Image (tube, rainbow, N blue to C red):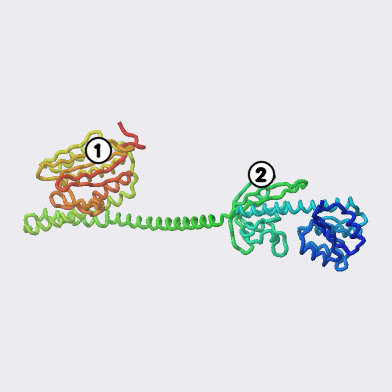
Amino acid sequence: MFNSVLLIEDNLGDARLVSDHLSGRFGPHGAMLQAPTLAAGLDVLRRKPVDLVLLDLGLPDSHGLQGYFAVHQQAPDTPVLILTGEDDDEQAARALRVGAEEYLPKRQANSVTLVRAMRHAIERNKQRQAMRESESRMRALVDAAGEGVLQLDSQGRVIYLNAWAGQLLGLRADSSRTMPGNRPLDFLDLVRSADRHAAQTLLSTPVGRRTSCELGLLRPDGARCWVVAAAGSYELPGDATPETVLILTDITLRKLDEDGLRQVKYELEYHAIRRAAMLESATAELQAINRAIAHDLRDPLHGIIGLTRLMRDDEKNALPVKAHDRLESLEQSALGMDELLSGLKSVAGLSQQVPLRDDLDLSAMAQAIAARLSATSPQRDVRWIIAPGLKAWGDLALVTVVLENLLDNAWKHSPKTSPAVIEFGQEDAPARGVATYFVRDNGRGFDPASAGVLFEPFQRRLSARGRAGNGLGLAAVKRIVALHGGDVWAECEQGVATIFRFTLERSPQGLQLC
């Protein structure tokens, strides 16, 4: 049953015949509307929607397919069945090609053929509208996904692109499928040359497979963008030629961030290399100065020391006491300067050394140093407390320097009149194979406020006799302990005790020695 049908026909006889063919085919509220001219028919369509238009091509105010185009423009979603007296196959083909649902010559129309053609036309139109609605929903979903979607034919030419893809690529969605010169838009035209091979591999994805890669794209306006392109190929029923769907995810901001970080890395590496070269140059200069200290400065200094001794010895009786004292003072100053230069040389050379580690018996090393110090002043009352069995993993020569400096420091700063106590030991069990050792004396101590600079070169600490050292011994201790991966620090209670602590590994890989 039909609801409403519009017949645009100027021949009253033909109109009456069509009405007879459709008799009884309308519902209770249905009817066939008639219009003798195209203008009258268009006026009906403007006022009332209909299920179908029956159109004669020979009207007083139109001829041929002009009438169809006018009706389709007025009611694009209404199916049109051309019912004409002209049995022209070529015109029928053109009519169907431009969108007419049926082309039926009047002489072939009867109550059966006409009704069948009308039903087919209405059904096909419904299916077409449903397909268009489905496509619209699908495109809306694709656009809402926030991804660029392109459909490519087997040659890699763009058949369809959604709004996101158009925005990303600088193209009008679903309308810009050509390049300048009306040349078909080939996806590879958008890929930068460095990624062309990867893109060709992507477009060769077999049916049923999914592949993806990063691509750099060049938009028609010259701007660059980067995407992750995921490709899948499919075959339409009855068509063995596969097509490809590309899903593009915009990663331009990420790539720009990566490029920025890469540039920062390059700049940092450049500055690091430059600073390393400057440091190498400065180190070479320091080594040259060190050589000058070792030879050019100390050689004349030794001459001064030798000459003053010779003058004091040769002219011992001839020189006045005052002159003799001045020569001795000059010799002591020169000896002090020689000691200072020797210390500078030692400290400067430490930074170039690589520890040759071995198992060390710290207790035995400390005992030997204590005996040597005691021999220099046998009259002193010093009690040595050296814990037995102290072990470490380090360079024998370097760790010897550490113990010599710390024990000598305690020897110098311990009391000279009252009984002195110098102790060397180890604190509680090692943590993770690293032991903490200490040297304690009961000397006058130091100002706690200066604890942070004790290990800096030329930071002098007065001895128990009021003499200041050159400040290089503790600096050497700090550098040697650092070379071994350890730490050193000092604590004191003024007038009671001074404690120097340092850490070293007990054994290789932190394994304790038995």
Q: Quadrant of the C terminus?
A: top left
Q: Residue 426 carries which label?
A: 1
Tell me which label, 2 or 1, sits earlier in the chain: 2
Residue 100, visible in the rendered structure: no
Q: In 3D space, how far apart are the residues under numbered discs 2 and 1 (Cα atoms)?
A: 69 Å
* Badge 1 amino acid: Gln
Look at label 2 and name its amino acid: Arg
Q: Where is residue 221 in the image (x, y as percent from the top left)?
A: 62, 64
Numbered badge on residue 209: 2
Residue density around tag 2, few if under 14, some if 14–19, many if 20 or more, within 10 Å: few
Q: Which residue is drawn at 54% across and 55% down?
A: 255
Q: Nearer the viewer, residue 78 or 151?
A: 78
- In this view, the residue in front, 316 or 398, is 398
How many numbered marks are there?
A: 2
Q: State yes or no: discs 2 and 1 in contact (Cβ < 8 Å).
A: no
Camera-side mark, 2 or 1: 2
Q: Which residue is drawn at 39% across and 58% down?
A: 278
